[in-house]
């Protein structure tokens, strides 16, 4: 409880709203209740980066991705091999894979930095759909994050979108076709994309792309489970009231 109180003080000092503060506390409570391993390490990462908004939001995205997986029956370990290394490992029904979580940031500086990373690779990028800059952003993000995935294991990049230009219906063909054409990521088993909102037309929020040239491809059973991920359940008013009583902000 003392850790929670200290985090509340830091969040208030950084100007976070009541909604943002309780969002973090609920996330920590959910992950602890559902048994994510190394949750203390995750909480420490959040705490250490409260003063850096983008880094803090990156770590928050890791926790939200972990919550999605544990809410769908996966056993999740945060930083399973330490740093450097993948953010998460997840297992279910005898299948295990590693996950590197990445968040699209809606800001010019980050887009510029990600585009510069393309100089590390020589593949020719082709413009698809939404434009060359968006394609380069996605390529750069995937290439950068996939480096953290271990070799000889199944590994996913879990992309979470804060960028409204990255639309879920276009995502697989538009943004990932070039990766296969240039065979850049043999160690990447797939990409799991969280559009950030539930699409009532498709009945989905999460979209899986399987790399057809992966060294360790995702099998059909695991693929079906990932393609049918459900959003973590919402909290009731009673749960929010109970949390406010335990951790009043005034």
Image: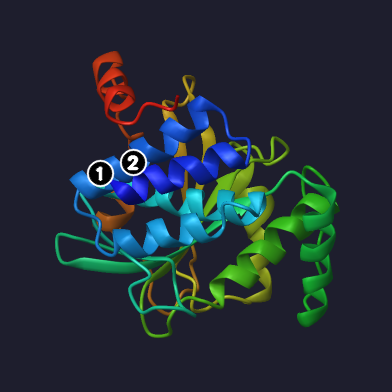
Which residue is labeled 1 in the image? 72
The outermost residue toward the front is: 250
Q: For residue 125, which quarter of the picture? A: bottom right
Q: Is residue 134 left or right of residue 174?
A: right
Which residue is labeled 2 in the image? 229
Q: Secondary structure at mark 2?
A: loop
Please determine whether, in this image, residue 158 is positioned above or below residue 161. below
Q: Residue at x 24, y 62 (%)?
A: 37
Mark yes or no: residue 192 visible. no
Q: Is residue 36 left or right of residue 169?
A: left
Mark yes or no: residue 42 visible. yes
Q: Quadrant of the C terminus?
A: top left
Which x, y percent locates residue 137? 75, 57
Which x, y percent locates residue 32? 23, 49
The outermost residue toward the bottom is: 152
Q: For residue 49, which quarter of the picture? A: bottom right
Q: Residue at x 63, y 53 (%)?
A: 51
What is the CA distance from the residue labelled 2 to the residue labelled 1?
Answer: 7 Å
The outermost residue toward the top is: 237
Asked whether 22 or 77 is in front, the reply is: 22
Q: Quadrant of the N terminus?
A: top left
Counting the numbered discs, the total is: 2
Which x, y percent locates residue 186? 52, 78
Question: In the drawing, what numbered circle is on residue 245?
Answer: none
Please determine whether, in this image, residue 209 is positioned above or below residue 82. above
Q: Is residue 51 left or right of residue 217?
A: right
Q: Residue at x 79, y 42 (%)?
A: 130
Marked residue nearer the N-terminal end (2 or 1): 1
Q: Kindly check if marks 2 and 1 are in contact, taking CB atoms under 8 A apart as contact.
A: yes
Q: Residue at x 69, y 35 (%)?
A: 164
Eye-nearest disc, 2 or 1: 1
Which x, y percent locates residue 244? 33, 24
């Amino acid at each position: 409880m003392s850790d929670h109180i200290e985090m509340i003080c830091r969040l208030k000092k950084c100007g976070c709203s009541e909604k943002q503060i309780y969002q973090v506390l609920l996330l920590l409570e959910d992950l602890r209740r559902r048994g994510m391993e190394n949750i203390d390490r995750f909480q420490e990462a959040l705490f250490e980066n409260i003063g850096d908004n983008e880094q803090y939001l990156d770590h928050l995205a890791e926790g939200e991705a972990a919550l999605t997986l544990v809410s769908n029956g996966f056993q999740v370990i945060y930083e399973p091999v330490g740093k450097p290394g993948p953010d998460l490992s997840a297992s279910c029904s005898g299948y295990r894979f590693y996950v590197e979580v990445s968040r699209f940031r809606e800001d010019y500086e980050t887009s510029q930095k990600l585009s510069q990373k393309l100089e590390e690779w020589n593949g020719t990028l082709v413009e698809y759909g939404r434009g060359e800059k968006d394609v380069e952003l996605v390529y750069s993000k995937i290439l950068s994050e996939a480096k953290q995935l271990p070799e000889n294991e199944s590994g996913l990049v879990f992309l979470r979108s804060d960028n409204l230009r990255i639309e879920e219906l276009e995502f697989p063909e538009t943004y990932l076709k070039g990766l296969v054409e240039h065979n850049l990521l043999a160690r990447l088993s797939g990409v799991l994309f969280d559009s950030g909102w539930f699409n009532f037309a498709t009945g989905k929020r999460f979209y899986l792309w399987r790399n057809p040239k992966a060294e360790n491809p995702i099998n059909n059973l695991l693929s079906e489970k990932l393609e049918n991920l459900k959003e973590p359940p919402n909290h009731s008013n009673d749960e929010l009231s109970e949390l406010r009583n335990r951790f009043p902000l005034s």
